[in-house]
Image (cartoon, coloured by chain):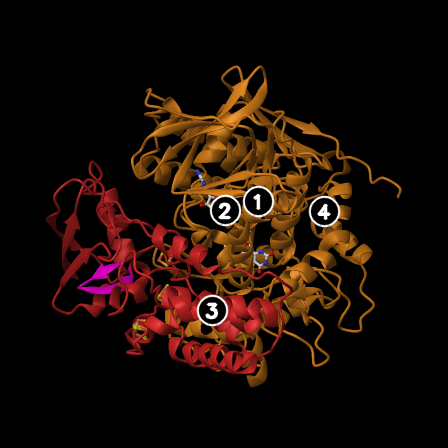
Chain colours: A orange, B red
Amino acid sequence: MINIIGAGLAGLSAALTLAENGIKCRLISAQQSERAQSVLAEGGINAALNTMGENDTPELHFEETMKGGCYLADPNSVEALTQSAPAVVKKLAFLGVPFNRNANGSIMLRSFGGQKKKRTAFAQSSTGKMIMTALIDEVRKYEAQGLVDRFPHHTFVRIIIENGKCNGVCVRDDSDKKLYDIYGSVIMCSGGLNGFFPGTTTGTVTNSGNAASVLFAQGVKFANLEMIQYHPTTFAIPGKRCLVSEAARGEGGRLFSERGGKRCYFMEERYPELGNLMPRDVVSREMFRELQSSADTFLDMTGINAAVWRGKLSDLRSEIMHYLAIDPAKKPVPVQPAIHYFMGGIYVNERQESSIKGLYAAGECACQYHGANRLGGNSLLGAICGGITAARNVTSDNSDVTEAYNSSEPFASVPSPMFVKETGAVLTRGLGIIRNASELQKALNELNAVKCENAVELARRELAAAMLMSALERKESRGAHYREDFPETKEKYRRTTVSVYENDRVNISFEDIPERRNE
Amino acid sequence: MTITFEIQRRKSAQDRPYIQRITLETEDTTVAEALDIMNDGELADDPIQWECSCKQKKCGACAMLINGKPRLACDARLSEFPKGVVELAPLKKFPTVCDLVVDRSMMYDDLKTLGAWLEDEAVCNGTGIAYDASRCLQCGCCLEVCPNFYAGGEFFGAAALAPASRLISEADKTDGKRLQTAYNEHFYNGCGKSLSCKNICPAGIDTERLLVRSNAVAVWKREKRK
Ligand SMILES: Cc1cc2nc3c(=O)[nH]c(=O)nc-3n(C[C@H](O)[C@H](O)[C@H](O)COP(=O)(O)OP(=O)(O)OC[C@H]3O[C@@H](n4cnc5c(N)ncnc54)[C@H](O)[C@@H]3O)c2cc1C
Ligand code: SF4
Ligand code: SF4
Ligand code: FES
């Protein structure tokens, strides 16, 4: 029996892989799969399917993923990711994901940032939702066979560590608040750290960051926590930021800034080759500079033709019209960068195993594949592949006992909304698009002054401190981490930032990245 | 603006429901945001329990009765209520867990009973039905207004029509038969075609189109079988 925490794309992928191999699992999640952040993904999923006559190959996909990530990802993991991508997308089509198709029936691909070939498979601008629906149905088949046992509305409390090994997980039934110890190996698929930045990311509130905090406090290693992706094109809606998918630029959208009525298409001017489709770290930084020099920034989608709006971006158009009362086919849309994705997370090796035996992690909660900057379309792929890899490597045993108890469990507490807001504001100040030592140090001091009322608040504060300390220690600029006091990229920092909590302290160190094996 | 919220509260299914009245001074925002503001402020010691995830009407978590109508709280603007009164209550066709949280597990049980999955490779038919149907949020708003749906019945409502339509449109012949039989038994035979579901669906799913297409396939395939 295997315990999967989280039922987004990574969790479903792990459950499906186990079930297909006849291995039983429990799929435990705070909310049903339909509510997972994965359903929000719009633009698409990358695979070198080479259906557009551009001579694309998995090797090129590998190179661009490594380059986009500024060579901070494990090349062997990226190799596995990019090699398996075409088969993954074909399997999704097999399961009925309604990908847009070429006239000859092959899967159509669109352009996405940081990639010179068309490589992103998509279903209009609701790719995540389409993939999730198909996987939910497929997993249901195995639920009916008793191979997947779902526990929705159950929240992670902590892992059970015995003799240095993870032997299970404690969860809370959110309906009756009872706690359960559930034995067996654990695969964490609990999504990104959005909850550390309340109200200011494009993600869901379900991904509170509590699970990650507790794991950190329990001694699980984390990696590259300073690598936080700002998406260049978002706008504010009540309680969060709404994404304008990169697909808009992939299909011809152009960024410009406006100062005193004068337009400047700054990306096209400064980066003639990839222009608006430079990797996100670069675009967000340029946007930030424009905004700082008191210009307004806009996405001009008026050049996109009617057929593309209808066939490829219809949901995006109606969303923008709904929230901003602007028809993007007729008028430019005001956009600004906002936090969108966490490249860092639970430290895992090539087999998706964490620093604690018996504990695996996949999807956005893990640090895998994306290095210092994720390419759009690689995270849906990464969630699926990570789930598959974890499921293939995890060992199943027969210890499927679950016991109920009602003891006073420190990690069953939750942080107060005030605490979350206060620490979130501090992190936002320290971990902006452009960082420096004094701001980071100031944020760290402010953070340490925030009072903690319970064990989860304390755990959360320590993980937040680890984010700031990772950013302080990386005295260079690379990908999403830009230090104005150290603007250069330095070879000696082409290493993984590792954060551990031991002896009541956060420790930051750097670890070498594995060499690419010769096949 | 000043909005008075009248919120149906209940500690657990065993407790008696009561109405809590709270007046909020705020700029125009969504009901979802207003709930957060109240919970973080005045109600911090006894926050209203409700489900929320995406805050952009894409996940179905926050479905509740808003002035008697099943809606998504993150898609209801305060300015829509000129009288300044907003009544919030849990969906009524599902058992209440607490406050505005209901137990929607019956929807998932129904889909299991229906056999809502594919046994074989999907047929890519290019009709767009799979795309439209896949957009279903499993929010349950349609069941709330459906005159024919009740918990524990054999008729599963539009929340099952949507997934079934995707699967029927993509299934090959043999698998299609299995799905049609289930569709007829758990949807077609019980649906009165009043289309209340179409008007309420927050995802804008055209249940009428799904119904017409799925019926056509189901009936057509039945005829071929004869
Ligand atoms: C608006 C938006 C658009 C995007 N577009 C794209 C795109 O076009 N292409 C692309 O590749 N990527 C895209 N991404 C990124 C991508 O969607 C995510 O990285 C990916 O879906 C993450 O999947 P996951 O399974 O790791 O996590 P999630 O889908 O976030 O799932 C997390 C799961 O964990 C559960 N959970 C969380 N906390 C707990 C807890 N404490 N206890 C129990 N369960 C818990 C949740 O209920 C959920 O089931 C986009 C992201 C956003 C926000
Ligand atoms: S058409 Fe009427 S009876 Fe049929 S599912 Fe919709 S609301 Fe229910
Ligand atoms: S059909 Fe519409 S109303 Fe019914 S569950 Fe699906 S999204 Fe909700
Ligand atoms: S919170 Fe997702 S639909 Fe309202």
Amino acid type at circle 2 is Ala
Towards the viewer: A317 or B192: B192
Measure the alpha-carbon separation of dots 4 and 2. Answer: 30 Å
The residue singled out by tag 1 in the image is: A15
From the viewer's perspective, is the residue at label 4 or at label 2 nearer?
Answer: 2
Question: Which residue sits at x=78%, y=35%?
Answer: A514
The residue singled out by tag 2 in the image is: A7
Measure the alpha-carbon separation of dots 3 and 1. Answer: 28 Å
The residue singled out by tag 4 in the image is: A70
**Which chain is disc 1 placed on?**
A
Measure the alpha-carbon separation of dots 1 and 2. Answer: 9 Å
Residue A37 placed where, x, y %?
48, 52
Q: Is residue A62 magenta?
A: no
Disc 2: CA contacts within 10 A as few (<14), some (14-19) or many (>=20):
many
Amino acid type at circle 4 is Cys
Towards the viewer: A434 or A143: A143
Can you tell which mark lies on residue B181?
3
Q: Main secondary structure of the magenta part?
A: strand
Mark 1 or mark 2: which comes first in sequence? 2
Amino acid type at circle 1 is Ala
CB atoms at circles 1 and 2 under 8 Å apart?
yes
Disc 4: CA contacts within 10 A as few (<14), some (14-19) or many (>=20):
some
On whether ligand 1 comes within 8 Å of the CB at mark 2, the answer is: yes
On whether ligand 2 comes within 8 Å of the CB at mark 3, the answer is: no
Q: Are marks 4 and 2 on the same chain?
A: yes
